[in-house]
Image (cartoon, rainbow, N blue to C red):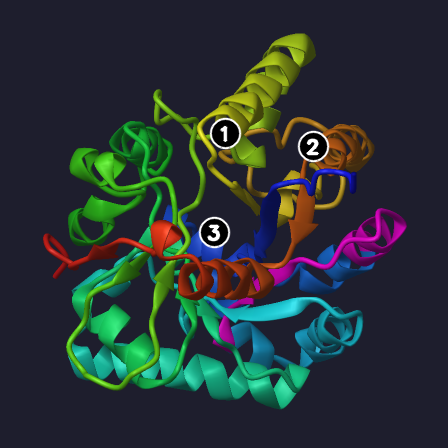
């Protein structure tokens, strides 16, 4: 009897740059677009190669056009990683854009990323998990295969309050823009398993939604930034939390999509000025050790793929097995 195939798990990294964190936080100097992306690529690529992994990097269009980043971002694509679209300006209030602004934002990022990496993006994640009907319809019009912007957690508004508390220098108008950062309570009730968006435009290819996985039943985050924060308090607690979350996923047949950020890999010794981000009191060696520990656990239990392969497998299964056909959801409640 052939060995049972492991369930899929997709791994992605939102390449949020130093300036984008500073901008969202309201810190001066972001207008100069300081970058740590070359440092990220230099550190992340050998780690992923060591573990034999190909993941998805969601890139920001403005960063792709910056000469300081081009060599590093090209190297990500050359190493065989999927490149996704993370918008052009990385504004977490993207959901407030008009339909035409959405088209311009997504198309501009797509072209900038293609010119630098040679990859045509077919996956999208909104900055700050921002999403709207205009964004989804633009993605479908442009032939995207999947969106990965939903974050079904009940802790989104609490995370937003924490973030705003740490951003005391923000003017009132800027705080208002961030009023939907990390989603609303009702967004926490969205499905954990992938589904298709029911959109207008007959004949267009299906647009699959692959949510950022949160702990089944409890709807609390399990991506690495949260695990790192727990590990600064207690590594055994972080280990138990993460492993039990993944066991729940297997039990309830949720094939996880796990999210990474640059600061999950880069510590306070390499990046200064972002003390508000969890875990920045730890150095890069500490984070790397923890990251590799969790990678080894994931590799034992799951087949790790990039998000494009996850989406294509989901669609192939849906077409082959009517019993597993993807549910259709309308973008109700989105702007």
Dot 2 corresponds to which residue? 301
Residue found 49% across the figure and 88% down from its top: 111
Q: Residues within 10 Å of mark 2 (few under 14, many from 20)?
A: some
- Judge depth for marks 3 and 2 and give the one in front: 2
Q: Quadrant of residue 7?
A: top right
Determine whether 291 is above or below 44 in the image. Answer: above
Dot 1 corresponds to which residue? 249
Q: Residue furthest front?
A: 1
Q: Is residue 52 magenta?
A: yes
CA distance for labels 3 and 1: 31 Å
- Identify which residue, 3 or 7, lies in the foreground: 3
Q: Are marks 3 and 1 in contact (CB under 8 Å)?
A: no
Residue found 56% across the figure and 81% down from its top: 113
Query: How many labels, in total?
Result: 3
Magenta stretch in the rendered image: 43-61
Determine whether 37 is above or below 163 in the image. Answer: below
Query: Going by the image, does 12 lie left or right of 167?
Result: right
The N terminus appears in which quarter of the rendering?
A: top right
Q: Is residue 87 magenta?
A: no
Dot 3 corresponds to which residue? 21
- Identify which residue, 326 or 287, lies in the foreground: 326
Q: Quadrant of residue 99?
A: bottom left
Residue found 56% across the figure and 22% down from its top: 247
* Nearest to N terminus: mark 3 or mark 1: 3
- Judge depth for marks 3 and 1 and give the one in front: 1
Name the element at disc 1. Answer: helix
């Amino acid at each position: 009897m052939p060995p049972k195939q492991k369930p899929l798990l997709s791994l992605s990294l939102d390449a949020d740059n130093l300036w984008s964190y500073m901008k969202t936080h309201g810190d001066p100097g972001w207008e100069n677009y300081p970058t740590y992306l070359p440092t990220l690529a230099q550190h992340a690529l050998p780690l992923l190669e060591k573990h034999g992994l190909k993941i998805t990097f969601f890139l920001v269009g403005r960063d792709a056009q910056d000469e300081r980043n081009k060599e590093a971002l090209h190297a990500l694509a050359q190493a065989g990683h999927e490149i996704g679209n993370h918008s052009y300006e990385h504004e977490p209030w993207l959901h407030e854009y008009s339909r035409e602004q959405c088209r311009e934002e997504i198309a501009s990022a797509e072209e900038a990323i293609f010119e630098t990496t040679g990859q045509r993006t077919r996956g999208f994640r909104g900055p700050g998990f921002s999403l709207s009907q205009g964004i989804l319809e633009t993605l479908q019009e442009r032939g995207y295969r999947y969106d990965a912007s939903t974050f079904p957690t009940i802790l989104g508004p609490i995370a937003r309050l924490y973030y705003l508390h740490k951003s005391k220098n923000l003017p009132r108008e800027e705080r208002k823009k961030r009023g939907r950062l990390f989603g609303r309570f009702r967004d926490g009730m969205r499905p954990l398993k992938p589904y298709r968006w029911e959109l207008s435009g007959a004949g267009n290819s299906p647009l699959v939604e692959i949510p950022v996985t949160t702990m089944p039943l409890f709807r609390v985050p399990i991506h690495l930034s949260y695990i790192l924060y727990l590990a600064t308090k207690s590594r055994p607690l972080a280990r138990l939390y993460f492993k039990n979350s993944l066991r729940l996923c297997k039990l309830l047949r949720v094939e996880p999509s796990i999210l990474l950020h640059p600061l999950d890999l880069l510590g306070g010794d390499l990046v200064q000025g972002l003390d508000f981000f969890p875990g920045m009191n730890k150095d890069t060696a500490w984070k790397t050790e923890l990251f590799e520990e969790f990678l080894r656990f994931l590799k034992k239990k799951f087949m790790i793929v990039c998000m494009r392969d996850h989406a294509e497998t989901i669609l192939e299964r849906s077409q082959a097995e009517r019993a597993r056909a993807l549910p259709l959801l309308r973008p109700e409640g989105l702007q």
